[in-house]
Image (tube, rainbow, N blue to C red):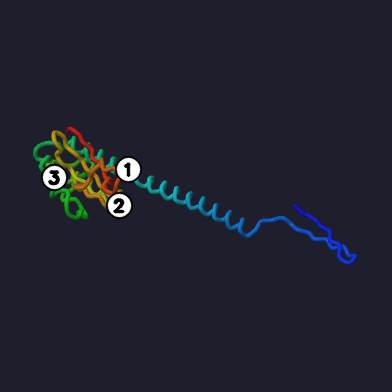
Amino acid sequence: MVWEAQLAISGKVIRAQSASGFSIIEVLVALLVLGVGVMGYAALQLKSVRLSEETYSRSQAMSVAQDFIERVRVNFNEASKARYVAAASWTGEVAESAPVSCVQTQSKPGLDHFCTQAQMADQDIFDARTHVAQVLADGKMQFSQCDNVYCVTVAWADTTVDTCDQADFADGARTANAHCVIVEFIP
């Protein structure tokens, strides 16, 4: 609002005008409020990205576990079970190629092209370990017997299959050791 005042000094009329506006304090307070709002929004976006990443990883882990379970169900017998359950099958570096290739691309394979059940188990383990290493950051997995059922454990990030604890919660949120899934099944 503009105000005018007249002041008469020695017969002269002097008009004083004042324009209303914002003081520097008001501007600084407004910038502070805006800054807090922008920081809150940025933190919300960052949390959203992290949760989306975790959901994606969990989805990929479930997909790898389900694929492996289907492979085990097809080839589950005494010879292959020993390979699947052996801890040595799941440790160490993943080889660059399968120990023996059970995948045939010929239109009519001969009798000498078939794999044994143990070789098929080795192929399944190689394929599963290769796939989990490709789709998950620091992904690893293991097949083991859990009580009366079998378990496929898939872990990623800083979690190992040995420290996987899906029930590891604190204050309603998953803790660092919860970057894993355990799928139980009966073959």
Judge left or right: residue 3 versus residue 103.
Answer: right
Q: Residue at x 65, y 58 (%)?
A: 23
Residue 102 location, x and y as percent? Answer: 18, 45
Please determine whether, in this image, residue 100 is positioned above or below residue 24.
above
- Comparing 90 with 100, the one in front is 90
> In the rendered structure, which amino acid carries the disc numbered 1?
Asp
Residue, disc 2: 137
Left or right, 183 with respect to 19, comes to left
Q: Say which quarter of the image contains residue 167.
A: top left
Q: Which residue is mark 3?
A: 119
Residue position marked by numbered label 1 in the rendering: 171
Which residue shows up at 51% across the image and 50% down it? 37
Q: Which x, y percent locates residue 62? A: 28, 40
Marks 2 and 1, how far apart in space? 26 Å
- Residue 185, image x, y percentages: 20, 34
- Going by the picture, which residue comes out furthest to the front? 10
Rate crowding at label 2 as few (under 14), some (14 to 19) or many (20 or more) other CA atoms within 10 Å: few
Foreground label between 2 and 1: 1
At label 2, the amino acid type is: Ala
Q: Is residue 112 visible?
A: no
Which comes before the other along the chain, label 2 or label 1? 2
* Numbered disc in front, either 3 or 2: 2
* Comparing labels 3 and 1, the label whose residue is closer to the camera: 1
Q: Quadrant of residue 61?
A: top left
The foreground one among 69 and 103 is 69
